[in-house]
Image (cartoon, rainbow, N blue to C red):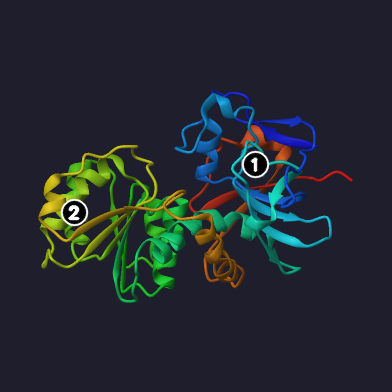
Amino acid sequence: MNAAVVRSFDRGPQYEEIEVPEPNSPHEVVVDVLAAGLHHFVRAQANGSHYSSRGENGLPLIPGIDGVGRLPNGQLIYFVSPDTSIGTMAEKTIVDLRRSLPLPDGTDVVRIAAAMNPAMSAWVALRRRIHFEPGQKVLVLGATGNSGMMAVQIAKLFGAGQVIGAGRDQERLESLKSLGADVTVSLAGDLEEATKCLGEAASEVDVVIDYLWGQPAALTMLPLLKKRSDRSRPLTWIQIGSIAGATAAIPSAALRSANFQLVGSGQGSVTMAGYLAELPSLIDTIAAGKLQVDAVTCPLSNVAEVWDAPTLAGERMVFVPAVRE
């Protein structure tokens, strides 16, 4: 079969012919891959920068964390890849049936492959990491990324009373209002000045969904907390991504001077069973068109050429392997 293969973290995946993988347990089966999304996680997986990476010991690697496939009996499924070096960007892959869900015939496989991963982060965070209530106000830090744009929609879908989106990309910021953002704040230019403005605009939020971390998070915390009308009212900061830096200098005053809670959401903080429990309702939501999805398909054979190609606001690249008979 053919697959996208990473042999060095210094080079993107190349389209190669390799052996079809063999199942190793009664729960595993080889499936035909119909669609696999190129998510931020997958890029980080392929360059070795994701916190779950096993480094050089994990090479060679077929990237890809999830996808839509067809079982040998013809059943269409959405699946999350097992924690191995055999990912989803191949004509065939190994699926642990315990990490899969059946899909009805006629499902838009590209739409599901494009939206599930970026939507899952905010969906699971709000459902599994905190007790989110309709009417609460939400700040999405990093709202101009694909996951952030999904987070804006999901917060509104869950009944947020106000959603504030903050990010650097002005074009994407402007598009957030059509997705449900009530207020947008630009983080472009002088970051200290931008975060002061953000602290004022978002001072009354109940939840922060943070895809940036690094300096933007560190600089936002105190201005936000100092402007709150009631510092004893709970504020929960959910750390999901680290696009702006893997570490942030958290001011001690943020933890002492307000009812401030910092939690993480990701692999490890939520069990696989927890993720799987949320997938049916998320799949139904995507299939029903309740989340805006802009998928761009590409043959897997072109993976090397398009891997680092820029995409437009909200676009998600989906590789479509051509399964050989």
Q: How many marks?
A: 2
Upstream in the sequence, badge 2 or badge 1? 1
* Residue at mark 2: 197
Quadrant in which the N terminus appears: top right
Element at label 2: helix
Task: Identify the residue shown where x is 29% and y is 72%.
Answer: 136
Residue extending farthest to the right is: 325
How busy is the neighbourhood of tag 1: few (under 14 within 10 Å), some, or many (20 plus)? Answer: many
Task: Identify the disc placed on residue 316.
Answer: none
Residue 105 % position (x, y):
76, 68
Task: Identify the residue shown where x is 34% and y is 40%.
Answer: 244
Residue 41 % position (x, y):
51, 43
How busy is the neighbourhood of tag 2: few (under 14 within 10 Å), some, or many (20 plus)? Answer: some
Task: Identify the disc placed on residue 87.
Answer: 1
Nearer the observer: mark 2 or 1; the answer is 1
Quarter of the figure with residue 174: bottom left
Is residue 112 shown left or right of residue 123? right
Q: Amino acid at mark 1?
A: Gly
Is residue 306 shown left or right of residue 132? right
Residue 67 % position (x, y):
65, 52
Asked if labels 1 and 2 touch by Cβ distance under 8 angstroms, the answer is no
Element at label 1: loop
Q: Amino acid at mark 2?
A: Cys
Vertical relation: 47 (above or below) 115: above
Task: Identify the residue shown where x is 34% and y is 47%.
Answer: 168
Residue extending farthest to the front is: 26
Q: What is the C-alpha distance between the residues marked 2 and 1?
A: 42 Å
